């Protein structure tokens, strides 16, 4: 393999592009107030399995917040306790982005 290829990127370049892409994606989503467009966008962006995992992670956070046990959530969404524990840990952080996002749900 030619190490001087125009397609060879350093780890730092890849990380920079990732961070720029994430920022841009978040900015575009934040500017969008059309839920139908976002749903269509997510269906284009993710495979069915990725989208299901993405949505289930959001739903599990809501269940944790309601007080549902981790074992019950695991049964409900057929997911590992590791994912649920991670979500629970993130939700307990003082400046939790999860809590902030949950507060945005129309009740």
Image (tube, helix red, strand yellow):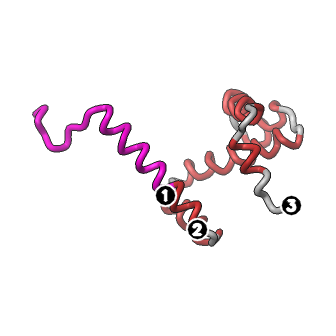
Q: Where's residue 44, x and y in %?
A: 49, 62
Check whether the beta carbons of the residues at disc 3 and disc 1 lie within 8 A of each other. no
Measured Cα–Cα span from mark 3 to mark 2: 20 Å
Report if residue 1 is visible in the image.
no
Q: Earlier in the sequence, mark 2 or mark 1?
A: 2
Find residue 39 and report its image quarter.
Answer: bottom right
Name which residue lies at 32% across and 33% down: 12
Q: CA distance from mark 3 to mark 1?
A: 28 Å
Give x and y (percent) for residue 5.
13, 40
Number of callouts: 3
Residue at 15% in and 44% down: 6
Quarter of image, res 89: top right
- Crowding around mark 3 (Cα neighbors within 10 Å: few <14, some 14 to 19, many 20+) is few
Which of labels 3 and 1 is toward the front? 3
Q: Give the extent of the magenta segment.
A: 1-25
Q: What residue is disc 3 on? A: 107
Question: Label 1's element?
Answer: helix
Above or below, 70 relative to 48: above
Query: Can residue 34 be spotted in the picture?
Result: yes
- In the rendered structure, the answer to whether residue 71 lies left or right of residue 56 reads right
Q: Is 41 placed above or below 75 here?
A: below
Using the numbered discs, state the Cα–Cα distance from disc 2 to disc 1 in whole angstroms.
15 Å
13 drawn magenta: yes
Q: Which residue is mark 1?
A: 45
């Amino acid at each position: 393999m030619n190490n001087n290829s125009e397609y060879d990127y350093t780890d730092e370049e890849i990380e920079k592009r990732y961070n720029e892409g994430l920022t841009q994606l978040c900015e575009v989503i934040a500017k969008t107030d059309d839920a139908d467009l976002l749903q269509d966008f997510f269906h284009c962006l993710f495979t069915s399995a990725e989208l299901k995992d993405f949505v289930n992670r959001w739903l599990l956070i809501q269940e944790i917040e309601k007080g549902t046990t981790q074992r019950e959530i695991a049964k409900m969404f057929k997911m590992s306790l590791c994912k649920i524990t991670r979500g629970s840990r993130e939700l307990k952080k003082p400046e939790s982005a999860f809590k902030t996002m949950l507060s945005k749900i129309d009740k």
